[in-house]
Image (cartoon, coloured by chain):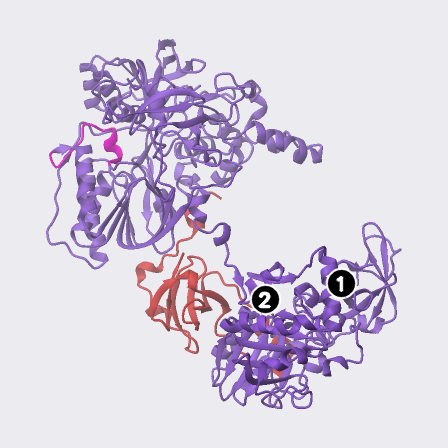
Chain colours: A purple, B red
Amino acid sequence: MSGANRIPGAGRLTPAKTARFFFDGKSYAALEGDTVASALLANGVHLVGRSFKYHRPRGIVSAGAEEPNALIGVERDAARKQPNVRATVQDVFDGMKVISQNRWPSLAFDVGAVNNLLAPFFAAGFYYKTFMWPKQAWKHVYEPQIRAAAGLGVSPTEDDTDHYSSRYAHCDVLVIGAGVAGLSAALAAAKTGARVIICDEQPEVGGALHYDKSVTVDGQDGFTWAQGTAAKLAKMDNVTVLPRTTAFGYYAQNFVGLNERVTEHLAKPDRKLPRERLWQVRAKRVIIATGAIERHMVFANNDRPGIMLASAARTFLNHFGVAVGKKIGVYTANDSAYEAAFDLKRAGITVAAIVDSREKPGEGVLAEARSLGIEVLTGHGVVNTSGKLRVSSMSVARNGGGAVRKIAIDALLVSAGWTPSVHMFSQSRGKVAYDNETQRFLPGTYAQDCLSVGACNGTNDLQATIEESLAAGELMSNASGFTASEKLALQGSNAFAWTGGMAGAAEGAGADTTVKAFIDFQNDVCAKDIRLAVREGMHSIEHIKRFTTNGMATDQGKLSNIHGLAIAAETLGREIPKVGLTTFRAPYTPVTFGTLINHSRGELFDPTRKTPMHALEEAQGAVFEDVGQWKRAWYYPRAGEDMHQAVNRECKTVRDVAGIFDASTLGKIEVVGPDAAQFLNLIYTNSWDTLKPGRCRYGIMLREDGFVYDDGVVGRMAEDRFHVTTTTGGAARVMNHMEDYLQTEFPHLNVWLTSATEQWAVIAVQGPKAREIIAPLVEGIDLSNEAFPHMSVREGKICGVPTRLFRMSFTGETGFEVNVPADFGPAVWAAIWAQAEPMGACAYGTEAMHILRAEKGYIIVGQDTDGTVTPDDASLGWAVGKKKTDFVGIRGLRRPDLVADGRKQLVGLLTKDPKVVLEEGAQIVADPNQALPMTMIGHVTSAYWSENCGRSIALALVAGGKAKIGQTLYVPMPDRTIAVEVSDMVFFDKEGGRING
Amino acid sequence: MLLIYCPYCEEERSELEFRQAGDAHIARPTNMTEMTDEDFEAFFFLRDNVKGLTFERWRHLNGCGRFFNAARDTVSDKFLTTYKAGLPRPDLSTLRPATEAIVETYEATESDAK
């Protein structure tokens, strides 16, 4: 037997299919198809958790997604632990480990329950007021303590070993919810041939048919009809049926996020399957059929385990075959709860009494109750309950006072009525409207192409729901361009029409400040807290929500919002619609991070870009650094070398012999067309008309505001063809910048731009022996200094493959940059290395490259400039064409502040102690003895140890820097103040002769 | 995620393929060097940041690569229309049926209790 409370013959599960699971280490029997909640209840376990703030014992409140209380942890192994799972939606599987949360040392005896006694100190907003001082204590004492005591489950600490998948889908009609309404709508839409997706959060379709056994549709039992309809739909080519799939977010233009739980219910899932799947659905039309959620009654001590929604008890009985108690009470304000009592009574359970706050319940249910011999107390309220770990009695009194009668029970079913689930509608930015007659918020003004049908649209009657849904299915298909060949008709019937319902505090909620009548179980918010918030001056529902935290828990107030609103309205003396609803936000129910981030984790989080020579560099012992998405060789340590030693050797070797360097990451743009030079004239500060084919020029690009945007060497390959290089990090934005101007400001120019960054492998060979290294490999190019001077480019062959060979240098040495088609890069690198190595040259990385260029005072845009530096500030004024009448940034450069004296200018810094290397980013002051806060006149942009200079070197932006050359400035650091002398920016080979070697 | 109609590709594509590129219909002056500081300030720095209808540039970056213009409502986030670069501002009165005139906002669906 799978639990003592299982009623033979009741429910839809198969008794032969059993499973065992563990709850807090104890083994329990279950049936296949059970949720954790139904299986625990079958075993008589109501106590499943402790509440968030007061650590009160809590049980199972609902049978579905709205569950606020029964949050559990589910463990598969050390890595796969899921906290805060709602026990009412988690299927049991064989061998499953379930743990309760927020209790210590055990669920039945919880030390934290002392909070319940201290409750007067924990009124709403208590932490805003109680823990004000001392100021530091909030961060270090109060907050950590409160967070440890209050709380939910614990996150797993290991990497999630599950994987998650993602799917985009387009359809004509998306139906959210597969109860009577959703299925009817999907059926009508599918018959027209429209592409339909229908999803439902539950394992099986049917919605309310899970519990309402009195329903028949099309002459069949309702639940049976639902399964048959879903099966029929699933067989149609134009329909996708997605059970276990929650529509969690409704975004712009009918873009709806679905979360499909693929393996969560399986004992031994195929590890190839994703745990969950994110569906991003773009629907031409959406039909919202999300039903309604039952509200609980708000009265004193309404949170004891065993007190649950009437519809939940009915679900546990009619679907799972579980009786939630042996002697139950009912406290209701509407008719639907009566049917729960009827079903339980017929199953042989004692119904102690139905307490109805109304004087006049529906006549049908009242007559049926009497004929079943159930005592009905109309105009009464439950004013209190007792029972430590499970409800044991209810105290009943006539409304307005009178004698209190204590009735022994072991479960109490409550219902204050039904709240239409307008979450999806509201998320679609539709505006809800308050219906005075039924006291409900219903879909009002639509903002997107969607329609609500059934209970979420306020339609109560079953036949009306069916007809409305069939019509909606057809209408939405028509709007998507499909027409029905035949009109569908379905007949439905149920036992009773339901009337009644209330919102807010019921009899027994008490008017004073001591009664705990909970409205929000998950955040421990009581009716008195809402009243307190209003007394404290919170008059907007948004303020009341935040002050009390009502509706701010993971269930987002599915049960509590309307109660909170009604109490607030009453206290404020305003009508409910005047107080207004808080906003419904995605996700509807919690969605795992795994689903949202999907494949974007680990190596797939961001693309990794490797140069063609990456593997060879790796073999040569390179250590790589990340430069944006690129992996770049940083330095090449030899045996016994640390980074510092390796970099010093590389720097020295390049200047003494030669070095080879992978410069493939440089951005490269091919600028082609009859107007190419004219275009570059507008994009760069330099003039390009005078550049002859075969020559190169260092170019500077500004933004329109006059500040340096990017730089690079441009080679003119032909009259109408330029090989433009950009910084590594600037490649994409420079391309965008050029395209922008070409397409929108200079569309009259006949120019084509092509990104060629990844088409060329670039090997820089730099140093006194650079020419000797490449000479044997090059064909068709005269490499002599006279024929091929510094800043030239030639086309020819190297190692038998075509090359664009640049004579240029970012080191100040004689240098070449060998461009070859990317696929030839490794072979050419290997050939050059074979030449270079015997001569004593080395491969060098980005760190040595940085130092070598700094020794020559060559700037790096983005390191030595920061978006506020003009060419003049960087001593690059020579690159600005003085005779030009237009280029991007020409007007910006003339702004008063950009030509004013005292601007920060790039200069060199030499520490008085040559051994001291400055810190990049360190601030510079003129007088180190001035009072704090000191006046900072600049900062260090680049600082290195230069083995070639035998001392430290630095570049810095200093206010009026060029006029301060020779002066002493100071760099205050936490432990000392460093004296520096301002210098020019060239530290090595000031005459610059080596470059022309 | 929005769908945006690229007037060059002539189809609706996902927002992921596009990048916003600032206000539209601000032509770069041809007499840059002769502009006064005030004129340059107005051209380069000053933008209206309108609430409601705005005209802006977008680029179909991960598609055809073209820059185009769009009329968009900054309150509802809706694109009213898109059109090729260089074309004048469209006459919006001809574009939207009256039923779409209601501009829905988050603010409007939130509490009207002030």
- Please tell me whether mark 1 sits on a helix, a strand or a loop: strand
Q: Are marks 2 and 1 in contact (CB under 8 Å)?
A: no
Question: Is there any visible trace of residue A283 in the rendered image?
Answer: no
| Location of residue A241 in the rendering, given as x and y in whole percent from the top left corner | 25, 45
| Location of residue A727 in the rendering, given as x and y in whole percent from the top left corner | 61, 70
Are both tags, 2 and 1, on one chain? Answer: yes
- Report the residue marked by disc 2: A729
- Left of A47 or right of it: where is A231? left
Q: Quadrant of the N terminus of chain A?
A: top left
| Chain to which mark 2 belongs | A
- Please tell me whether mark 2 sits on a helix, a strand or a loop: loop
Which residue occupies the extreme front position in the image?
A838
User: What is the magenta range?
Assistant: A206-219
Q: Is residue A341 above or below residue A621?
A: above
Where on the picture, by quarter, is residue A914? bottom right
| Location of residue A759 in the rendering, given as x and y in whole percent from the top left corner | 50, 73
- Left of A689 or right of it: where is A287? left
- Report the residue marked by disc 1: A943
Question: Is there any visible trace of residue A374 in the rendered image?
Answer: yes
- Label 2 and label 1: CA atoms lie apart by 20 Å
